[in-house]
Image (cartoon, rainbow, N blue to C red):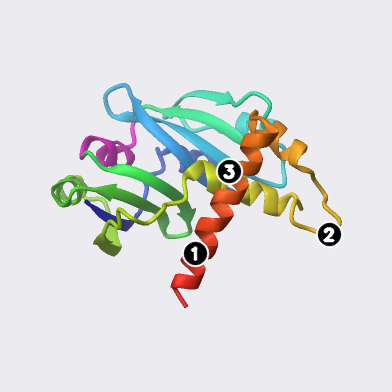
Amino acid sequence: MIEAKLKIRMPETCAVAAVRASKAARVKLLDTAPHEMEGVKSLLQIESDACLDEVLSSISNRNVDEINKISDSNTKAAISVRRCIPARSIIEAGCFIKSAKHTEEGVEWDIIARRSSLIKLTEILEKNNYSFKIKRIGDLDLHKEIITNREMELLKYAVYQGYFDTPKNIGIRGVAKEFGISISTTSDMLRRGLKKILIDYFEGK
């Protein structure tokens, strides 16, 4: 198994582009699954100066099939699009999506896959004339604890909402409520995620 980072220029029909074309400022893909023949259903974290309801109601992309705001969340929504070849190709090639984020040049995907699956993915993208670049590739370290999307999402929310500030702008109870999990689970995930990030930081020194 290998780890790879790919930057793919996404079409205007993808869920991320549909949201970016509205009033959203920052969009991160948390999860994705197949939808119909060529589409995907994406769970997105959306950060904008406008409220989430306003952002979602302003989406006018004809390729969008369904938009669902995640209950009790001010930043998350599930969006289904009828056609998104790059995202669908990652799934069908047998690659595991570790994380993805939008940049001005496209979407950066961190994936885990067999080498044969990565080759298959690049062949599909080339066949469909999608511009992409492999920015990093390496063997998967099976002994290394990889921070999960959920842990990273939780930590980022805690940081930006002021959980680590003095005095705190939000307590552990507020973070737990946002994610719909118990206080003890929230505390454990924050500690695990922070430990993994610190280990990565010190090992990179």
SS at badge 3: helix
Q: Which mark is residue 189?
A: 3
Is 112 on the left or on the right of 195, as rendered?
left
Task: Write down the residue under mark 1.
Answer: 199
On the image, the x and y values in percent for residue 3 come to 29, 55
As for residue 86 lying within the magenta part, the answer is yes
Question: Which element carries disc 1, helix, strand or loop?
Answer: helix
Residue 199 is covered by the magenta coloring: no
Residue at mark 2: 166
Horizontal and vertical percent position of residue 117: 17, 45
Residue drawn at x 64%, y 39% is 186
Q: Amino acid at mark 3?
A: Met
SS class, disc 2: loop
Q: Earlier in the sequence, mark 1 or mark 3?
A: 3
Side of 135 where 104 appears, left or right: right
Image spot of residue 1 (x, y percent):
21, 51
Tell me which secondary structure the magenta stretch mostly adopts. Answer: helix
Q: Looking at the image, which is closer to me, 58 or 114?
A: 114
Part of the protein shown in magenta: 83-93
**Above or below, 35 relative to 87:** above
Disc 3 vs disc 2: Cβ atoms closer than 8 Å?
no
Asked if the residue at tag 3 contacts the one at tag 1, i.e. Cβ–Cβ closer than 8 Å, the answer is: no
